[in-house]
Amino acid sequence: MHVRLAKVVGTTVSTAKDPALTGLTLLLCVPCNAAGEPEAGDRFVAADTVGAGVGEVVLVASGSAARVPERTRSAPIDSTVIAIVDSVQTDGKTTYSKVG
C-alpha cells in the first residue's frame, strides 16, 4: 500500500462492469516523476474520486488504501486517484507546478 505520483493519460469506458464501479470514472494513468513527466512503467487504471482529467498530475493510492475513500469502499479496485497535484517541491525547489 502506497501513494504515488502519476499523470492521467486517458480514460476508459466500460458498459459491462461490477455494479460497485457504477458512476466511477476510470482513468488511465502512468507513473511520473517529481517534475510531472511520465516515467517508464506500466500504465494502470485508477478510479477517480476527485474529478481529475487527462493531462493532470495526480496522487494515486494503491492496495488497501485505494478502498479507504467512501466512494470506493466496496469497489473491486486496486488504485484510486485521491488528489490533483497543484505543485511539487523537492529539496526546497519547485519541480512541478500546475500553473505555468
Image: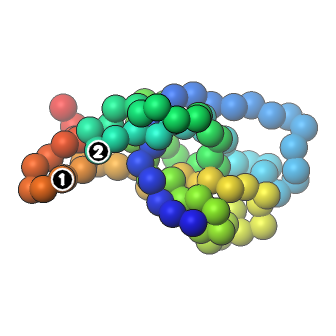
In the picture shown, does residue 55 fall above or below 80? above
Residue at left offset 78%, top offset 67%: 74
Q: Which amino acid type is marked by label 1?
A: Thr
Q: Residue 10: x percent and y percent?
A: 57, 28
Whether residue 98 is visible to the viewer of this picture, yes or no, is: no
Q: Secondary structure at mark 1?
A: strand
Number of dots carrying numbers? 2
Q: How many C-alpha atoms fall within 10 Å of the one at disc 1: few (<14), some, or many (≥20)?
A: few
Q: Are marks 1 and 2 in contact (CB under 8 Å)?
A: yes
Return the disc, 1 or 2, that comes first in the chain's sequence.
2
Q: CA distance from mark 1 to mark 2?
A: 8 Å
Residue under label 1:
90
Q: Residue furthest front?
A: 40
Q: How is the image coloured?
A: rainbow
- Figure check: 3 above or below 100: below
Q: Split into 4 quadrants, where in the image is the C terminus?
A: top left
For the point 88% across and 50% down, which residue is it?
Answer: 18
Q: Residue at x 40, y 39 (%)?
A: 32
Report the residue marked by disc 2.
34
Q: For the residue labelled by badge 2, is the local secondary structure a helix, a strand or a loop?
A: loop
Q: Quadrant of the N terminus?
A: bottom right
| Quarter occupied by residue 11 | top right
Tell me residue 84's x, y (percent): 40, 49
